[in-house]
Image (cartoon, grey):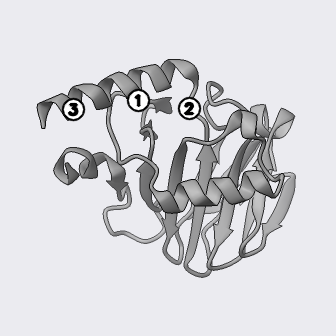
Amino acid sequence: RGATFMQSTWTDPATGARGQGRQVLQFGSFYDYAAHDIAPSLLVEPMDEVLEGLVDVLIAAGALPASVRPDTAIVNVYRVGDNIPPHVDHPDYPRPFSTLSLLSEAPMLLGTVIESLGNGVFRAPVSALLPRRSLLVFKGNGGDMAKHCIPAVKARRISITLRKQPPWARDINTAARRAANNLE
């Protein structure tokens, strides 16, 4: 089972080089960063009980609506100098979605236009500090129109992005999991 899912679950686009991305663990459904597309037929590990428990706590606290219960998680592991370039999350993901910051604080830059200055340095109209153990919830224009990025981090950092699959992706993902289970 692990061999079936692990290749897509763990990616390191930086291939060990500092400052060129971050290491990524994906659970629930695969997101193809190169194509900027949801790829639900490429299987990853399902969300485990720890991530499901985190979602339960966030919903119980009123931080996330139960009606848009996340069923995918992306765990970003940042080494010193790693960054996430400016982007808007795929429009098919239902809003809101959220990002939990762990280990260290980091600025998030936001704006409809974010300029890349090279080496993980960006210029944007808004900078918001994401404290350690903070949750940022994206909805409305913040989720639909504003780009966001994390400049090169100064300390090790982990973030967990929680999203709900769109119905079309969930259907494909469910069928792919059934087919994979029938092969084992």
> Marks 1 and 3: which is nearer the front?
3
In three-dimensional space, the C-alpha distance between marks 3 and 2, rounded to whole angstroms, equals: 19 Å
Compared with residue 45, is residue 184 higher up or lower down, i.e. above or below?
above
The location of residue 155, given as percent across then percent down, is 59, 81
Q: Disc 3 or 2, which lies upstream in sequence?
A: 2
Q: Residue 40 shows which numbered tag?
A: 1
Residue 156 lies left or right of residue 97; in this view the side is left
User: How many other residues sit within 10 Å of disc 1, few (<14), some (14-19) or many (≥20)?
Assistant: many
Three-letter code, disc 2: Gln
User: How many other residues sit within 10 Å of disc 2, few (<14), some (14-19) or many (≥20)?
Assistant: many
Label 2 sits on residue: 165
The location of residue 7, given as percent across then percent down, is 25, 50
The quadrant holding residue 177 is top left
Three-letter code, disc 1: Pro
Residue 46 lies left or right of residue 144; in this view the side is left
Q: Which of 50 and 79 is in front in this view?
A: 50
Q: Residue at (86%, 55%) from the top-left corner?
A: 126
In three-dimensional space, the C-alpha distance between marks 1 and 3, rounded to whole angstroms, equals: 13 Å
In three-dimensional space, the C-alpha distance between marks 2 and 1, rounded to whole angstroms, equals: 9 Å
Q: Residue at (12%, 38%) from the top-left corner?
A: 184
Compared with residue 180, is residue 104 higher up or lower down, i.e. above or below?
below
Q: Which residue lies furthest to the left in this view?
A: 184
Circles 2 and 1, Cβ within 8 Å, touching? The answer is yes
The location of residue 58, given as percent across then percent down, is 73, 56
Secondary element under disc 1, as helix, strand or loop, is: loop
- Is residue 123 in sight in this rendering? no
Q: Residue 180 shows which numbered tag?
A: 3
Residue 122 lies left or right of residue 177; in this view the side is right
Secondary element under disc 2, as helix, strand or loop, is: loop
Three-letter code, disc 3: Ala
Secondary element under disc 3, as helix, strand or loop, is: helix
